[in-house]
Image: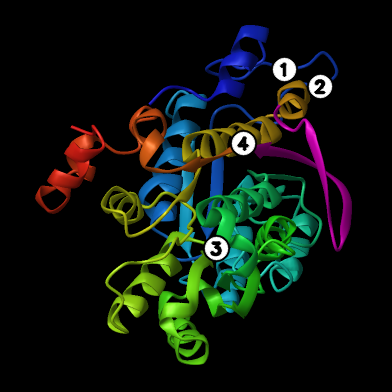
Amino acid sequence: MTASTSALVLAACGVVDGIGGSDSSAAPKKGNDVTVGLLLPDKETARFEKFDYPLIKKRVSALTNNKGKVLYANAGASASKQSDQMATMVADKVDVILVDAVDAKAIAPAIQKAKDAAIPVIAYDRLAQGPIDAYVSHDNELVGEVQGRAIVGALGDKAASSKIVMMNGSVADPNTARFKEGALSQLEGRVVIAKQYDTREWLPEVASANMKQAIQSIGLSNIAAVYSANDGMAGAVIDAMRGAGATKIPPVTGQDANLDAVQRIVSGEQYMTVYKSFLLEADNAAEMAVAKVQGRSIAFDALTPDSVDSPTQKAIPSQLVKVVALTKDNIKDTVIQDGVYTVKQICTSKYESDCAAIGLE
């Protein structure tokens, strides 16, 4: 994998190097002995443990001449556990915390305690409430727009009379509302939204139960497409339809470009997923964390060109990474080109003929 675009730009400007540059108004607060606390929300979403954590760890090490370290904890989808994990990191006096909140509101008191202990907190992937110092994620409303647009495009001339099911994410995740808002901007008035569900903790088993209820209510043959907010739920939705007797799966969306989702796209079971560059998001989060601790305000400001509001805070310095709709047509140009997966990993014996059919070999 290559370094992130922002890292390259900053390096060219002379504000990122092995130790980290400094601006003219302040000396770095610390050297390279940086400890970054990383709190990720769950293990159901494959990307967190497989990509985000190792990428952040690698980048922190590279930015600190191998002297910096990452203290990692996964909440296993428990908001209370994550609050306890943050409290432990505050007690351990880490230098900065990156938190991907299980519940954006529930984590706020723990963030306040970190603030009281003079530990900066950067919200990662999901916009946490409380006094955060910065936010790095993707354009989450655009994610929903891309998904919604894909469904309308797949249905074509039949869209206006087509019934779809919306399988939204967890209401505790602030991104869910943005995904939904973006999707509805493309779907409302263009399709018939027959059923809509919020999925507790993004759990595939909850999505499966909801899909079974939708099938019973609407009728399997009457479901023209399913908006699934992420890949884990997409897999559950597809399995539920298979279990109900579907021989052909209608268009189903996803998000995160999980390996099994990319394979389902190759085989035609899943219509698309939203590919969000884990590398750019993780690298930029690591760079923001290190720059914040080392007092490099020029580098930090360059990494946060955007601004977002949370329910508790206005004008949060942010970086929103672009997203891409991944379909059969651009697998080579996205996850393979970026080194996320190899052709060999995608095209196992089960998918060999499907891969050959789309020129993926």
Few, some or many residues within 10 Å of mark 4 (<14, 14–19, 20+):
some
Q: Is residue 61 left or right of residue 129?
A: left
- Main secondary structure along the magenta-highlighted residues: strand
Viewer can see residue 78 = yes
What segment carries the magenta color?
303-322
Which of the two discs, 1 and 4, sits closer to the camera?
4
| Labels 4 and 3 touching (C-beta < 8 A) | no
Residue name at image x 56 percent, y 16 percent = 8
Mark 3–mark 1 contact, CB under 8 Å?
no
How far apart marks 3 and 1 lie (CA) works out to: 41 Å
Q: Which mark is residue 322?
A: 4
Q: Residue 39's image quarter? A: bottom right
In this rendering, would 16 be left or right of 61? right
Query: Marks 4 and 3, Cα distance to the nearest angstrom?
Result: 17 Å
Residue 86 is covered by the magenta coloring: no
Contact? badges 2 and 4 (CB < 8 Å) = no
For disc 2, the marked residue is 26
Q: Tell me the mark number nearer the camera, choosing from 3 and 1.
A: 3
Compared with 204, 31 (above or below) is above
Say which label, 3 or 1, has the lower sequence index.
1
Q: Identify the amino acid type marked 4.
A: Lys
Q: Which residue ends up furthest to the right in the rendered image?
A: 314
In the rendered view of the protein, which quadrant contains the N terminus? top left
Pointer 1: what residue?
22
